[in-house]
Amino acid sequence: MRAAVAFLIGAVLGAIAGAGGMLIAFPFLFPLPVVAEKAPSADAASVLGTFKFDETAPGRDAVHWANGTGALYRVGDAAVLRFDDNFEAGPGPNFWIYLNTTPVGDEVSFNADAGRVKIAPLKSFTGGQNFALPPGLDIAKFHTVTIWCESFSVYIGSAALPVR
């Protein structure tokens, strides 16, 4: 009986450890494909400004990081947030893009911003990608674009927006 209980406890703990390990390892073993979306056409869009991910933010580390540049575009009545072809982020699960009303450089500053708006999941860890912003969103109210890991509540990277 004692051996059966020990076996059952070991099996449960092993399953939990295996599932947790796969959650962490999955993006490294099976990375998202590189995205190469084109920037909005100059005929249909105007650039509102450009930005660069902060490579000195206090929340960055060897695993949680994002580098590259991007831009905000006005396309008719809509706005598009773009990460350029040189964009890269350390792989991980469930990364989302947010717009923040305050400067963000770590978990504390991200969580302190009650006015943040969740935009979309990150499409890939590398490459050019476009994100349509919600209709009617006043981008002048936002200070920072942030990449956030929803699974572990971890800061990945941020950039100060050009429009304020």
Image (tube, rainbow, N blue to C red):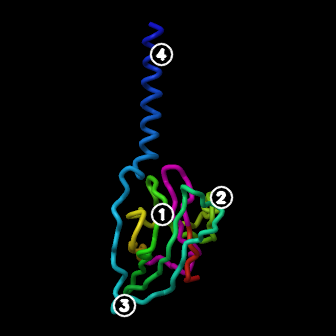
Which comes sooner in the sequence, label 3 or label 2? 3
Disc 3 residue type (three-letter): Ala
Q: Which mark is residue 89?
A: 1
Disc 4 residue type (three-letter): Ala
Q: Which mark is residue 6?
A: 4
Which comes sooner in the sequence, label 1 or label 3? 3
Q: Would you identify the image quadrant in which residue 119 lies?
A: bottom left
Q: Nearest the camera: 104 or 55?
A: 55
Q: Give the vertical position of 26 relative to 84 (above or below).
A: above
Q: What stretch is highlighted in magenta?
A: 136-157
Q: What element carries label 1?
A: strand
Q: Nearest the camera: 79 or 121?
A: 121
Task: Give residue 114's position: percent from left, percent from top.
Answer: 60, 63
Q: Nearer the viewer, mark 1 or mark 3?
A: 1
Q: Give the vertical position of 75 relative to 30 (above or below).
A: below
Q: Which mark is residue 114?
A: none
Q: Pointer 3: what residue?
A: 42
Q: Which of marks 4 and 2 is in front?
A: 4
Which comes sooner in the sequence, label 2 or label 1? 1
Q: Distance between the residues labelled 1 and 3?
A: 27 Å
Disc 2 residue type (three-letter): Val
User: Which of the image's four quarters has the N terminus?
Assistant: top left
Q: What element carries label 4?
A: helix
Task: Give residue 99's position: percent from left, percent from top.
Answer: 52, 70
Q: Distance between the residues labelled 4 and 2?
A: 41 Å
Q: What element carries label 2?
A: helix
Which comes sooner in the sequence, label 4 or label 2? 4
Q: Residues within 10 Å of mark 3 (few under 14, many from 20)?
A: few
Label pair 4/1, CB-CB below 8 angstroms: no
Which comes sooner in the sequence, label 4 or label 3? 4
Q: Residues within 10 Å of mark 4 (few under 14, many from 20)?
A: few
Residue at the extreme bottom of the image, as rendered: 43
